[in-house]
Image (tube, coloured by chain):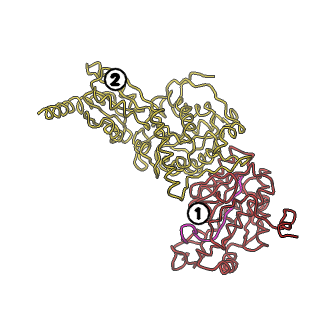
Amino acid sequence: MSELKLMKGNEALAEAAIRAGADAYFGYPITPQSEVIEYLMTEQPEKRTGMVVLQAESEIAAINMVYGAASTGKKVMTSSSSPGISLKLEGISYLAGAELPAVIVNVVRGGPGLGTIQPSQADYFQSVKGGGHGDYKLYVLAPASVQEMSDFVEDAFNIAFKYRAPVLILSDGLIGQMMEKVNLKDQLPRLTNDEIIEKYDSWAVTGRKNRRRNIITSLDLQSEKMEARVHRLMKKYEQMEKEDLRYEKILCDDAEYLIVAYGSSARISQKAVELARKKGIKAGLLRPITLFPYPKQPLFELADQVKGILSVELNAGQMVEDVKLSVEHKVPVEHFGRTGGIIHTPEEVLEALEQKIIKNGNLRYHTTRESSIL
Amino acid sequence: MEILDIIQPENQVFCKTKLMTDTALSYCPGCGHGTAHNLTMEVIDEMGILEDTIGVAPVGCSVLAYDFMNIDMTQAAHGRAPAVATAIARTWPEKYVFTYQGDGDLAAIGTAETIHACNRGENIVIIFVNNGIYGMTGGQMAPTTLEGMISSTSPYGREIKSMGSPLKITELVANLPGVYYVTRQSVHTHKHARKAKKAIQKAFENTRLKQGLSFIEIVSNCNSGWKMTPNESNIWMEENMFKYFPLGDIKVDGKLKQ
């Protein structure tokens, strides 16, 4: 039954995993995402749906458990926070290389190093530029509410199995820890072992029966075969860009100034856009929902309409590089963000828009235009 | 009578292991891995559990085990096979899950995964081939390299003071309550291979009876890494490796041997 509840983001995500019909969760405690495994251990989904929950000895063990279960066609998830995700990256690269479906959740905290336990978006590069070794990408979903923490779990599993590829839910300590009302989805049934064998018999290792053996590996010692594997992966990523890009435009139709922000920064920036509109500034917000694939084309098109773009992130400037790449120098692009676990206020964002874009950006924009006329 | 009349299945006294593929082994001539592979596949075939067996290959010489073992297999990251096997056994409790690992994989980089899978008493079989050296990467020192033994990263011999003692991980895991069966075998003679096969059989039986973790160490040779002929390496193994890693059962039916 679908139901309305007041929940923490981390709890909503854990409950959504049960309801999405996940077969297993493997994790290791780390702030600010420990509620995920705590909720699952308390809820005992083994009794509700038969879902396995296990606290691993490390993040490394947890991601390799995910690899094991995914090898057999099971729906499996793990979650962690930044330092823990760094530990998982080898396993994530293996999942991508071996073409296995899995859902990984990062409830980001500030870094580098042990950093801080407060919210951050400083793992953008790690999430969308590889992170682990080799030529691979992750499909990255960025929830901006507790509702999306819940909704994106099923979406992530669907994408993971559509492409046989690992999917990352990139949240942060703010979305993970805050409480909001959430509409929980209906319980989906878990696939039976027979259904898994029938559905994934072409690749999953479930025991050789009436077919050739199945092998899960990311190893190809022959260069030509390895190159073919990489090309196969690249084709998947191209298809993701064509079919599964997600973004949201807020007040963009008549916007003269654009803010680009995802996750918790998007929530704050939405308020900043409202404040700007009250002051008569025609601001709009583009919220990438998937960070890979990235909304390159929508941004490229909006760059013809707006006078400047501000990339608002809880980091020292990461996504701003992708914004710049997308708009191809058509308009000035600046970054604004706090780090160290500090969350910017809507007022700070508005001030940054005025100072960095409206004041300076306009000047630079017109200077360029005039010089080109001369 | 023509020779082809004699070559009939009913006259056959020895044949290729059914569950081994026709791919030529990538192991050096004289290496014990081929025998250990054969024995494992024979047990799975004879027990009739092919349809329910999932193997986990490591990183090391046996990384390509799935090229030779004609069963469903997944290849794990270096040292993580016990974690991979844990998840498979947990989500498919009716299956037979085994890992096949070397000493670098199991006793160095994968120590944490080994100890914790053992401690949880996962219902899996771990086959641990210990040849005291990193074979695949070209003969570097392993956690089980003997004192004074020369390798490419202990070119003056393993020195205990600075490099530590060879790790008896098998004795270590035997002391964990979750572990049901621990034995140390070898495969360098027919007699030893037959005993090793019985041990492997017992281990898979334990899985069937859901007794928890079975751990089989196979002390083996690495003639290439040890820079010896195959025969010399077997003699050296008997004289040196078996002294430090004595063969025999260490824990049977959950009880440590005195």
Residue denoted by label 1: B60
Colour assigned to chain B in the rendering is red
Asked whether residue B177 appears in the rendered view, the answer is no
The three-letter amino acid code for the residue at tag 2 is Cys
Left or right side of B186 for B112: left
Badge 1: few (under 14), some or many (20 or more) residues near its Cα, within 10 Å?
some
Colour assigned to chain A in the rendering is yellow
Q: Which range is magenta? A: B122-139
Q: Please report the residue visible at 70 percent of the width from the left and 34 percent of the height from the top.
A: A47
Chain letter for mark 1, please. Answer: B
Q: Please report the residue visible at 69 percent of the width from the left and 66 percent of the height from the top.
A: B34
Q: Quadrant of residue A198?
A: top right
Tell me the number on the disc at residue A252: 2
Give coordinates of residue B223: x percent, y percent: 62, 75
Query: As displayed, is residue A287 above or below residue A238?
Result: above
Give coordinates of residue A38: x percent, y percent: 58, 38
Q: CA distance from mark 1 to mark 2?
A: 56 Å
Residue placed most toward the observer, A173 or A135: A135
The three-letter amino acid code for the residue at tag 1 is Gly
Q: Quadrant of residue A117?
A: top left
Magenta-drawn stretch contains A239? no
Give coordinates of residue A349: x percent, y percent: 31, 30
